[in-house]
Amino acid sequence: MANPVLPSSGVLSPLGLDAVRLSPGFWGDRVALNREVTIAHCQEWEEREGWIGNFRGERPRRGREFSDSEIYKLLEAMAWADHPGLPALAEIVAGAQEGDGYLNTRWSGSRYTDLEWGHELYCYGHLIQAGVARLRTHGEDTLTRVAVRAADHVCRRFMEGTQTCGHPVIEMALVELYRVTGTERYLEMARRFVERRGLPALADIPFGRAYYQDDLPVRQAQVFRGHVVRALYLASGVVDVAVETGDEELLKAVEAQWERTVARRTHLTGGMGSRHADESFGEDYELPPDRAYNETCASIASVMLSHRLLLATGDVRYADLAERTLYNMLATGVALDGRSFFYANPLQVRVPAVPLDGVNHAPEGGLRSPWFDVSCCPNNIARTLASLPAYVATATADGIQIHHPTPAEIRHGELAVKVETGYPWDGAVTVRALTGGRGRIALRVPAWAAGARLTHRGEVREVAPGYAVADGPWRTGDELRLELPIAPRWTFPDRRVDALRGSAAVERGPLVYCAESVADEPPLGDLAARVAPPVEHHVDGVVELEVAASLGGGEQSGWPYGHEPDGRPSGADAGLRLVPYHRWGNRGPATMRVWLPVG
Ligand SMILES: [Zn+2]
């Protein structure tokens, strides 16, 4: 089963890359672009930056202390994509592994002297995930042997004692290696790493131990906190440990933390993280659009966690959040040409970014960059898109569940179906049986899709958000048709989100929209939109929207405060064009805003 997550129990079983084949469409096109362009792009930059040369022993060593992990993420992407460059790159990595399995180009000679910031176990985590991907798509080879030797080294070195790594990911990697090999010490090592956190296991640091989730034992925490990627990678590993050890209390703890985080610490795009200084969550309801951080990697971690919770519980809310995050964060993180990337993903950009040659020109958002000094996001996008088919559908003993409608062929047991849809631009989803067979087919109906209708054997019925189900038997050519009401809708924030008070946003289907201003288009700093049904414009296969808004004339009083509430800007209403948020920043430097002042 070619699958990044393959729990041995749970309500839903994932279907892997061998069961789900994407066809041309929103995600199929992106997966193909990733395989044909982005993977090679990442490898070229890693070579150019010297990060691959580090494994060849080239000195001085180049890159940050965790740059090894970028090569491992790329190897994972190559494994899922069955990329021909993998064996040669794996040989280079293997050349740097020491006799006892230790492998790190930065800390060789001063092993484990800085567990707080050294990222050694974090790097192994990504190496092991790459090894698991290779085992599940190809079988044993150089890469898988390197990964297993590293995992065995970790178990020997860390099984006893109280130590762990400042950056989680080793936990979920070891559980997955246990799942694919059956070797129980990997699960036990992961369990111990989880239980050690918060005892505490790491030194106090200026950011505070919450930064690396070492302030409290996992079971006692109420909400995700600290560095977002660390928090969500850890939570993913905790779910994996809970599922494999049958620890209901541990699973319930993560579910409760997820629930509160989604209710109070998540941006409309699904992005998480409001603090730039330590890349962390803010406090509850601290969700400023312009200072949103929303690292692309954090959104990938969120999808990984939601997917695990969906498999464990079958609760549709996890698939809903994954969808929001995939369409508005993952798709935003990479340019339409597959060669540049966002690191931070704010919901408002006030000043157009200044393009510079080379790298790292806008790590805080505004313009995608071909590379960064810390290039976690490009490689993370590459491995996630390469394995994306594995997130689309699941199975149970009685049939299949399609969580993310996208053109695809899905096979499981007796069932083989073809999914046809123009989603997310169009709300119609057709599932056609390619063979006869028994089994129930379930299609997710997102929470926003009240009034959806399902047509089955000539009967039309309304289906509530959750899952629309239809039972077989199916004959070749039988069709199931779901109509999701996809009209644009206005969305208003909870009043406790101070930074958004007086504003509203527009969504259509799973997509969040934004106003974007490039070159000499009107600026977006002073406007008021009318809450009225937006007008749709179909432009080259993309749906843009138009709302009425008055744009300010730029008058200012010299002091931005007064003794009466401020009114609307003085400009007459005009049409304000909105584009899908994931497409913004593809036309050059721009200003942008998701939340529009209304009234
Ligand atoms: Zn990143």
Image (tube, helix red, strand yellow):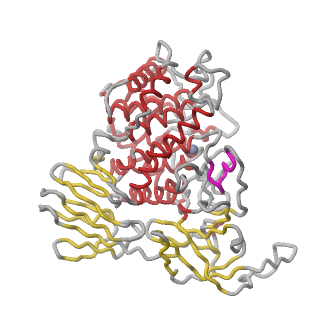
Residue 366 is inside the magenta segment: yes
User: Residue visible at 61% across and 23% down?
Assistant: 106
103, above or below 372, in the image: above
Residue 479 position, x and y percent, is 20, 67
- In this view, the residue in front, 298 or 493, is 298
Q: Quadrant of the C terminus?
A: bottom right
**Which residue sits furthest right?**
558
510, above or below 233, in the image: below
Q: Quadrant of the N terminus?
A: top left
User: Residue visible at 52% across and 24% down?
Assistant: 162
Q: Quadrant of residue 323?
A: bottom left
Residue 73 position, x and y percent, is 49, 36
Give the magenta part as a residue range: 360-369
Split into quadrants, the picture shows ligand 1 in the one at top right
354, above or below 460, in the image: above
Q: Quadrant of residue 44?
A: top right
User: Residue visible at 36% across and 50% down?
Assistant: 391
Residue 62 position, x and y percent, is 65, 28
- In this view, the residue in front, 36 or 155, is 36
